[in-house]
Amino acid sequence: MIIFYYLLTWIVYILLAIPLFFLSFLKAKYKHSLKARFFLYKNLVQNVRDVHFHACSLGEVKSIKDLAFLFDSRITTITQTGYEEAKKFCKSVNYLVFENFIPFWLKPCKVLVIFEAEYWLILILISKLKGAKIILINARISDKSYKNYKRFSFFYKKIFSYIDEIFAQSKEDQKKLVDLGAKNIKIVGNIKINSKIQINKNYEKLDQRLIIFANTHKGEERLLLENFMLRKNEKLIIAPRHPERFEEVANLLKAKKLDFVKFSSLNLSSPSFKNEFKSSILLLDSIGELVNFYAISDVVVLGGSFIEGIGGHNPIEAASFNNILISGIYFHNQKKLYEAVENIYLCSDISELDDKIHKLQKKAKINQKSNLNIIIESIKEGINARKSL
């Protein structure tokens, strides 16, 4: 099966290589990641380290930060935002190459730590053949994904046969994992809750009440704006989830003839940021700034949850700053994180959004923490058992 799968990766690569090459020039978010992953552009060198952490994107990379600091670590990721975040705290960072390249690209490590659902068979197999202990952390399987996993249970059973230890988010996840052939599973909760939320700039608290539409997706900005009326003593920040949509949202605001300014056009050297924020609405067309505005916000409306098919976003970062937190009802991918936060107001009827923004009073509060010590000890055991590597 493994030989057949590996040959299949080469067939897929041959078929997709040319389209992916052109796509890497057409979309900004793929500009570096596709070239690095599928054509090894500036991605040939990988450092030998004790622990190899692999996480998909921005939120996952943030969650492994504290663990990566404790060890001689390298990080691989899939997305450009994840890569840029990892570079902030780790010197050895690579995009994970497509599976056909892994056998001759991957350097050995003592422990491979995979985050959540990054089930790359060749990555896991080659790491195991090179002597690594394989650990899966923050493991979860949504109800929707579980149905798909069951269809290919023979494939996932093979993957789980190479994983030495699994740290799951819940008993429900543990049960699903066991059903798919996983073994040696411990429940530690969701480690994203443990992420230390830190601002990188100190903005002055505004004189007006600050409302944020955060991590919004296509269709949500229009939906939220149509069910919300900004008042005189209020300011609104709209922060689209994906950078490639910044201009699209700007055009929407222009079409609605709303008074707005782009964050990128502000004079950040001004002595007072709030004096620069003169318009009613700020379009946050910058990556890495949202957390700084959470810190001075009064109300956060969390996007990715008002239309079906996305599954919501991590509420922990927004809930860390003593504000009112409002969400839609489509957050199935983030259920465990939502359970860890008190006073998340759910808006099942979008016509009630304006009332909720202006009348709700209780502020969000994080009420759970998971224990990383058991994961840390597992990694240490893996390193100590492989000191000859």
Image (cartoon, grey):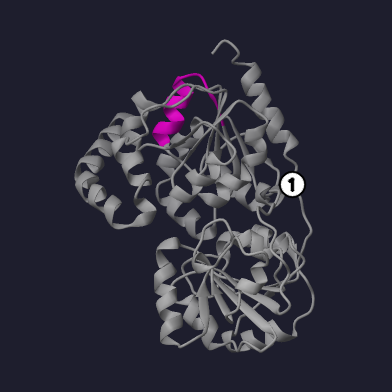
Q: In this view, does 103 lie to the left or right of 365?
A: left
Within the image, what quadrant is residue 328 found in? Answer: bottom right
Residue at 34% from the left image edge and 24% from the top image edge: 104
Q: Describe the element under mark 1 as helix, strand or loop.
A: loop
Q: In this view, does 37 lie above or below 207?
A: above
Residue 123 image offset from top left, x and y in percent: 43, 32
Give x and y (percent) for residue 133. 56, 25
Is residue 144 in view from this perspective? yes
The magenta segment = 121-134
Which residue, given by chain and number where applicable, does mark 1 sit on? 370
Residue lying farthest to the top in this orientation: 388
Q: Which residue is drawn at 57% across and 80% down?
A: 279
Residue at the spot x=53%, y=59% of the render? 143
Q: How many numbered markers are drawn?
A: 1
User: Magenta stretch: residue 128 in it?
Assistant: yes
Where residue 304 appears, as percent x and y from the top left, is 53, 68
